[in-house]
Image (tube, rainbow, N blue to C red):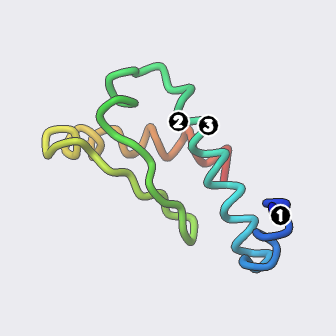
């Protein structure tokens, strides 16, 4: 009745997609380690595709804040990618 999740993922995803998904999970973990707690509460990572991280902001003010933090965030996540 229950199947091992790894077997199901292997059937659904190609090796490249699986690698990208694992990077996505690692990025989400690193997001939790960011010192800025208000940033964590007001923005979250929703996707990672083709070396592009998609972040959803709570409101336009936080979207603007993310624009200013873009370079710092890139530096932090380039190590992961």
Query: Does residue 38 appear left or right of residue 6 in this picture?
Result: left
The span from disc 1 to disc 3 (Cα, nearest Å) is: 26 Å
Position above or below: 74 against 11: above
Alpha-carbon distance for marks 2 and 3?
5 Å
Residue at (22%, 46%) from the top-left corner? Answer: 63
Q: Secondary structure at mark 1?
A: loop
| For the residues bearing labels 2 and 3, Cβ distance under 8 angstroms | yes
Label 2 sits on residue:
31
Identify the residue at image location x=39%, y=20%: 37
Q: In which quarter of the view is residue 17 placed? A: bottom right
Q: Secondary structure at mark 3?
A: helix
The residue wearing badge 1 is 3
Element assignment for label 2 = helix
Query: Pointer 1 and pointer 3: residues touching (CB < 8 Å)?
Result: no
Q: Residues within 10 Å of mark 1 (few under 14, many from 20)?
A: few
Measure the alpha-carbon separation of dots 1 and 2: 30 Å
Give the position of the N terminus as an image quadrant: bottom right
Camera-side residue of 1 and 17:
1
For the residues carrying marks 1 and 3, which lies nearer the camera in this image? 1
State the image coordinates of residue 54 (x, y, percent, origin top left).
42, 58
Left or right of 35? Residue 50 is right
Residue 63 versus residue 2: which sits nearer the camera?
2
User: Which residue is labeled 3 in the image?
Assistant: 29
Q: Position of residue 74 (x, y in %)?
A: 49, 46
50 on left or right of 67: right
């Amino acid at each position: 009745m229950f199947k091992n999740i790894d077997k199901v993922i292997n059937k659904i995803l190609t090796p490249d997609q699986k690698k990208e998904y694992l990077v996505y999970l690692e990025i989400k973990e690193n997001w939790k380690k960011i010192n800025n707690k208000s940033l964590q509460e007001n923005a979250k990572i929703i996707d990672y595709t083709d070396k592009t991280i998609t972040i959803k902001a709570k409101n336009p003010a936080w979207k603007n804040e993310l624009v200013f933090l873009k370079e710092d965030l890139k530096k932090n996540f380039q190590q992961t990618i």
